[in-house]
Image (cartoon, grey):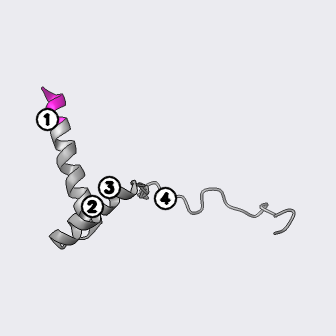
Amino acid sequence: MKKEYDFSKGVRGRFYSKSAQHHIPVYLNRSLMSDLLKLAEHKDVEIEDMVTELLDKDISIVKAVLAK
């Protein structure tokens, strides 16, 4: 690694995209991950799809309760 880098010709925000979507990793404990993997395999679906479906259902329940 160099001691110094020359950024004098750099362009601020060159790769910035206002519409970019960021995917945030979620870390689960081993027990939960194991259970989710087994369920996804049993349902023959990708784990990402199954977790998204489960979270969507939970969020809709919470929203319904909060709306009362």
Going by the picture, which residue comes out furthest to the front? 31
* Nearer the observer, 23 or 65: 65
Secondary element type, mark 1: helix
Labels 3 and 1 touching (C-beta < 8 A):
no
* Nearer the observer, 33 or 56: 33
Residue 67 lies in the magenta stretch = yes
Q: Which residue is mark 3?
A: 32
Labels 4 and 3 touching (C-beta < 8 A):
no
Would you identify the image quadrant in which residue 66 lies?
top left
Q: CA distance from mark 3 to mark 1?
A: 26 Å
Would you identify the image quadrant in which residue 27 lies?
bottom left
Q: CA distance from mark 4 to mark 1?
A: 34 Å
Residue 6 lies in the magenta stretch = no
Which numbered disc, 3 or 1, marks the residue that appears first in the sequence?
Answer: 3
- Residue drawn at x 22%, y 62% as measured from the top left: 50
Of labels 4 and 2, the one closer to you: 2
Labels 2 and 3 touching (C-beta < 8 A):
yes
Which numbered disc, 1 or 2, marks the residue that appears first in the sequence?
Answer: 2
Q: Is residue 30 left or right of residue 43?
A: right
